[in-house]
Image: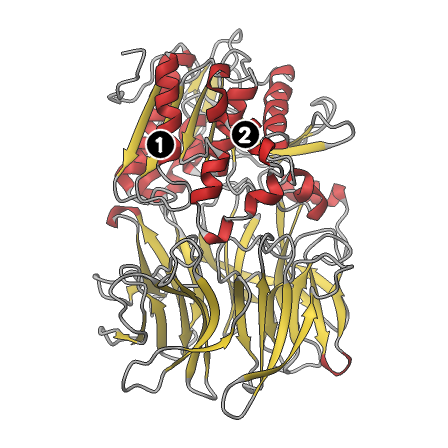
Amino acid sequence: MAISLSAAVTALTKRGFTRLTLPHFHHRLIRVSSFRKMTSASSIEGGQVEERVTGPYGSWKSPITADVVSGADKRLGGISVDGEGKLLWVETRPTESGRAVLVKEPEIPGGKPVDIIPKEFAVRTLAQEYGGGAFAVSGNMVIFSNYRDQRLYKQFIGDPSPLPLTPDYGGPVVRYADGVVDSLFNRYITVREDHRESSLNPTTTIVAIDLQGGDIQEPKVLVSGNDFYAFPRIDLNGNMMAWIEWGHPNMHWDKAELWVGYISENGEVQKRICVAGGDPSVIESPSEPRWSVKGELFFITDRKSGFWNLYKWIEHNNELLAIYSLDGEFTRPLWNFGIKSYDFIQNTGKANKIACSYRQNGQSYFGILDDVQNSITLLDVPFTDISNIMSGPSCLYIEGASAVLPLSIAKVTLNGSQSKAIEFSIIWSSSPVSMKYKAYFSLPEIIEFPTESPGQNAYAFFYPPSNHIYQASLEEKPPLLLRSHGGPTGEARGTLDLGIQYWTSRGWAFVDVNYGGSTGYGREYRERLLGRWGIVDVNDCCSCARFLVDSGKVDGERLCITGRSAGGYTTLASLAFRQIFKAGASLYGVADLSLLKAETHKFESHYMDNLVGSENAYFERSPINFVEKFSCPVILFQGLDDKVVPPDQARKIYLALKKKGLPVALVEYEGEQHGFRKAENIKFTLEQQMVFFARLVGNFQVADEISPIKIDNVD
């Protein structure tokens, strides 16, 4: 069932979005049922009309403090279901220095979830540095990767003593991810990344690990020879294994292959068939292979249409059958192992009923797909963004969020015909207290704006200032903080982020940009960035800021930019090569492309070959080589254990800007890697950005008590 643009907009409006369209704002759709109704001079709280306090944008008081934000910055590391039908998940805890804990759904609804692993363990793999797929469940047995030593452990639920499965190599030099239990041979099949011979160029293979007990043995290699592997998946009878592989210089989303191998009587993988990706005339990136109960292989690929859609492999003639075609994305880039965008619902009919989600026009849709009818029935759930789906007994578990719901896991109960969601309940929330602050929430408005390429538009989520206690004078326009997402093959999602609400509830406008190269809009949009990283992303961020200024939404003299990782590079490049922004904050961003290429890890070691191109472009697009073009304040934040963007990147640009005489500050965190996980560091980073921008750009006093760090060439 194809969704028209007008229907998509209607759905967005229903769930908390507004939309701003080109060329003006007159077609803006207003959310019908909002949290509150505002007037220019008063707020309505509990039926009482109260006069609003007039204060400069940026100076407003808000209960959404940096402590609240850092405590709510929890992440999920995958979901699964045990033999009793109970949900298990991995959650990171900033208050425990970012420890990743395996947790089980409470036995009694409303009860407290139970930690499965002992306190000295953490469920996290460093495979490909970004990890994911760190655990698997079979019955009441859990197999997980332990963060400290990267060994695999086996533990039975209820037994507090994990047992090691893989050898001790004296350190975390061998990593495992994305595994499944092979019941026929009583073994665990997983991706292994071996750093013993080379830390910069580890060997990746698919291996089998014996689960029968006894002596710990060296894993047995089943598939090898390519640079990268993911999704090893065994059919229910144990006769076939599917997997994804790809090689340099491609990233998975550029070009990959789906293979199937038949398993011999002694457990070897033989008679291998390339199912998708082997035809050089068809550029595709297959993903997420999964076997149905009937032994049929399903997967997602973007062949021909450029959109990741569902397909089925017809084994007897090696044919691919499109299950459902749509200009929407049924999966996302493989930055992390263990993605699960769809799952099979158990039924006794002729059709496979598949619970799935797809992304279209900045919104996730959730439904049940019938592979015989080639039809999809959309389900009405509160989430507008869905990440992972797991089928449970008579229910579905989905990981998602919305403009007013933080990252959560929900249980969805379907009716008998599996056509409606009759019950929706939150099992876990990254921020259970977030609804206390709903009166302060700024709802995202989807904006579409013109880029510098004629006829091409880009997209963003715009959050206006929102605080029911305060208003600014009619003559003042708010400062803007623009965020460039990481990746750069990533996506801004338009979901509740208390880190964004921290800014908007204090009187800032905030915009999250999906520049050309972002995902969620198909291959053609994603490939706008090929050979043009540092150009397209920079142009689109600047165009977005100008669009908001020209529309009268923000103050053109108070434009700031921030970004993490690749977004930090776009931040620095925007400040070096353009004169739109008045200050910037780079979180573990890239300053020197050539240095990054020489130092970064294997997974991304050739990523920039496609994004940048020639050696001359590496020089011309590196902010470090054009320090003389910087003209505004910069603050930098960096983890000292970062293996993706090493600390030298931040130090080099910091010293160069300091020498030039610009206001600059550098904050370095011991024990932090690529992305900050400790609550105290998340809090400090947020507060220091706020006070840095307020001091040097905002022309206002922040309401919070924040002790600013020393700014070179200012203090």
* Mark 1 vs 2, N-terminal side: 2
Report the residue at 26% width, 18% height from top: 710
Near mark 1 (Cα within 10 A), the count class, few <14, some 14-19 or many ≥20, is many
For the C terminus, give its image quadrant: top left
Q: Is residue 287 above or below residue 164?
A: above
Image coordinates of residue 287 in percent, x first then y, are: 61, 62
Give whichever of 282, 401 is nearer the camera. 282
Image quadrant in which you'd find residue 565:
top left
Type of amino acid under label 1: Phe
Residue 30 at what x, y percent from top left?
Answer: 64, 31
Residue 111 picture quarter: bottom left
Q: Amino acid at mark 2?
A: Phe
Mark 2, other Cα within 10 Å: few <14 / some 14–19 / many ≥20: some
Asked which secondary structure carries label 1, the reply is strand
Q: Which residue is mark 2?
A: 619
Give the residue pinned by disc 1: 637
In whole angstroms, how far apart are the C-alphas of marks 1 and 2? 23 Å
In the rendered image of this protein, does residue 33 appear above or below residue 605? above
Query: Which mark identifies residue 299?
Result: none
Q: Residue at x 53, y 65 (%)?
A: 229
Compared across the picture, whether 66 is left or right of 370 comes to left
- What residue sits 62% from the left and 45% below the top? 519
Instruction: Specify the quadrant that holds the N terminus.
Output: bottom right
Q: Is residue 507 visible?
A: yes
**Residue 490 appears anywhere in the view:** no
Q: Quadrant of residue 417?
A: bottom right
Residue 270 screen position, x and y as percent: 59, 83
Q: Return the x and y of residue 681 as percentages of the image width and height.
A: 29, 37
